[in-house]
Amino acid sequence: MPLDPLSSTFAALADPTRRAILARLALGETSVMELAEPFDMSLPAISKHLKVLEHAGLISRGREAQWRPCRIAPASFKEVDGWLGNFRRFWDESFNRLDGLLEEMKAEEAAKAPPRSNRKVRVKKEKQRGRTRG
Amino acid sequence: MPLDPLSSTFAALADPTRRAILARLALGETSVMELAEPFDMSLPAISKHLKVLEHAGLISRGREAQWRPCRIAPASFKEVDGWLGNFRRFWDESFNRLDGLLEEMKAEEAAKAPPRSNRKVRVKKEKQRGRTRG
DNA sequence: AGGTTATTTAACCGATGAGCTAAATAAATG
DNA sequence: CATTTATTTAGCTCATCGGTTAAATAACCT
């Protein structure tokens, strides 16, 4: 029976071929043939993978003559990210801690001074892991 | 054959029972019995789910007498988040766009004005989701 | 030791998933 | 119209998965 959307999406992501396809699509829309090219796998297999990705809402497909170009579809990615957000405090130090606000403000301050393109604005302190028992 | 770690993790997340278990564990460490309680499912089934989650690196387990308390393990969550980050630009407006910097600066400005003590520093629009992440 | 509680292992079953080959469909082109 | 190119459908196999019940461990408590 039909899985809930989040389960379909995670299931779709649980395959390295499909993740590689998504990585390729992150570079831009392309055809099934071109998507299939790097893999030692039949075309029907790729076709199935694409159907899984589409059903999971991770890609969408157009029609141009005999090609069905594929592209990333944002919605399901966003859903996954949203779900993951419920757990972010477990690994992201700059998230949702007592002094988190402070640290973030500091980080933002720091980010404003040098307009460097430094991603990963870690604040480097390692505070206590909140147990939040309850 | 052993799946690569990311595949195991996504596969583990592709089941609503397991996600519910993780949601429960987000509230704090607990026993198998207590984890099993909400589900209309045998204990061995839960035990299997826990094994899958553990093998996926999403939980870790201790030993206290006859109990094996489970808790969230951050590493795999972080890996998933990292992988997802490669696609963030597809749905996160405040990420990696020309005016992204501008928007973020606006959001930060707005966040600075009211020094409310509310965690979840929402700026009211569904904007700003990846601030400390460059 | 014997019993109770917590959890796992073993053995099984039906459904699903990923791969294949062969054949079908769709649209451009000679 | 026949052919080539792009993609999908059909039908098959084999492995894995999620669930079951019955039995085995493990640690505590008389």
Image (cartoon, coloured by chain):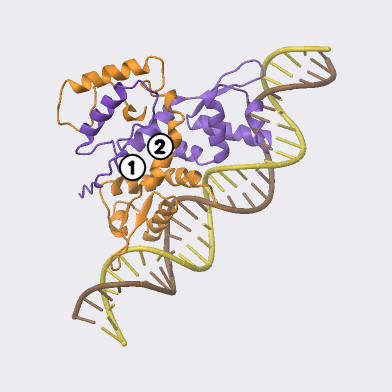
Chain colours: A purple, B orange, C yellow, D brown
Tell me: residue C4, above or below residue A77.
below
Query: What residue is disc 1 on?
Result: A91
Tell me the subunit letter for badge 2.
B
Q: Secondary structure at mark 1?
A: loop
Name the residue at 47% across, 45% down. B11
Q: Is residue B48 left or right of residue A95?
A: right
Query: Residue B128 appears in which quarter of the rendering?
Result: top left
Q: Residue at x 53, y 31 (%)?
A: A23
Evaluate if marks 1 and 2 touch, with contact meaning CB atoms under 8 Å apart.
yes
Give how far across and how far down residue B93 sits, in percent: 37, 20
- Figure label count: 2
Q: Relative to A28, is B86 on the left or the right?
A: left
Residue A4 visible within the image? no
Question: Residue reaching furthest front?
Answer: A114
Q: Residues within 10 Å of mark 1 (few under 14, many from 20)?
A: some
On residue A132, which mark appears? none
Name the residue type under label 1.
Answer: Trp
Residue at the spot 44% in from the left edge and 47% down from the top edge: B12
Where does residue A2 sit, x and y in percent of width and height? Answer: 46, 38
Q: Is residue D9 above or below residue B43?
A: above
SS at mark 2 in the image: helix
Residue found 67% across the figure and 19% down from its top: A66
Reading the image, the residue beneath label 2 is B81
Query: Residue D19: percent from the left, percent from the top?
Result: 42, 55
Residue B69 rendering spot, x and y as whole percentages: 30, 59
Q: Amino acid at mark 2?
A: Asp
For mark 1, name the chain: A
Does A20 sit left or right of B125 as displayed?
A: right
Number of residues whose C-alpha sits closer than 10 Å to that of mark 2, classed few (under 14), some (14–19) or many (20 or more): some
